[in-house]
Structures are given as C-alpha cells and as structure tokens.
Image (cartoon, helix red, strand yellow):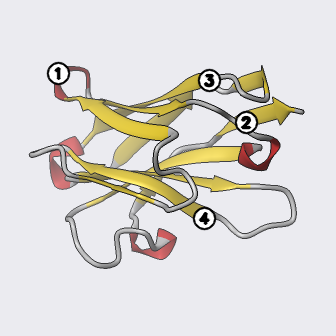
Amino acid sequence: QVQLVESGGGLVQAGGSLRLSCAASGRTFSTNVMGWFRQAPGKEREFVAAISWSVGSTYYANSVKGRFAISRDNAKNTVYLHMIRLTAEDTAVYYCAARSGWGPMISIDSSYDYWGQGTQVTVSS
C-alpha cells in the first residue's frame, strides 16, 4: 500500500499563488508516477498535472499550462504543485494520486491506484 497526504490548501485571492504538497509513504517503489487532480463543486474530477519520480517527466492539462508547475523531491518522497495567477475557476478540492507507470492513460483518474484525502483550495474573486 501507498499512503498519500496532501497539504498546503487554503484561501487565496484571485491572482495569488499557492503551493500544494503531497507526501508519499509505504510501498512507494511500486509507483513511478504522481498526479494531481481536482474536483470543483458539481463537476467531475479533472486531471491537472503528472510527474515521474524517475526522470521527472511532466504533463499538464491545457487549462493550467503556464500557471501551474509540478515538481518532486525524491529524497523526501514529496511532490509539489506550484500554482500562480489563480482564478476562481481553480477553486476545488485537489487530490494527489499515484500509479505505476507513465503512459497514454496518465490523465485518466481511474488509471491511478492510490489517492490522498484531498486539500481544499478556494480562490476568492
């Protein structure tokens, strides 16, 4: 099993920035890809970004390109999501997730095996 714990959410004004963290523990060697997803009220969960532990490859949803950056600290088993120029449309619960390998399904939530409990991000306009 892999345990994922998100932190760093909160209330921020539009145009502001925030950094989310996701700490992984347990059988982390079984996972090579970490992803961030978000779910806004009344909407389906959507992909935000993903990164590979091994080589640091990244992939982003078009809606966040240029504003969000995903990074990792292998020594700390922690993945970060740096968010800038936030808008009200970024308000959501943000989840980190883990899966075994990189591939074409990387933006599909059902392809991830482990999930954190989520952290709320609220952007006030």
Circle 4 residue: 46
Disc 1 designates what residue?
A: 75
Mark 3 vs mark 2, CA separation in Å: 14 Å
Write down the residue under mark 2.
Answer: 120
| Tag count | 4
In what element is the residue under mark 3?
loop
Which residue type does callout 3 highlight? Answer: Ser
In three-dimensional space, the C-alpha distance between marks 3 and 4, rounded to whole angstroms, equals: 20 Å
What's the residue at 52%, 40% (across, down)?
Answer: 67
Q: CA distance from mark 4 to mark 2?
A: 15 Å
Label 4–label 2 contact, CB within 8 A = no
**Residue type for callout 4:** Glu
Kindly report which numbered mark, 3 or 4, lies closer to the viewer in this rendering: 3
Q: Residue at x 46, y 74 (%)?
A: 108
What residue is shown with label 3? 17
Instruction: Write the residue at 62% across / 23% down.
Output: 17
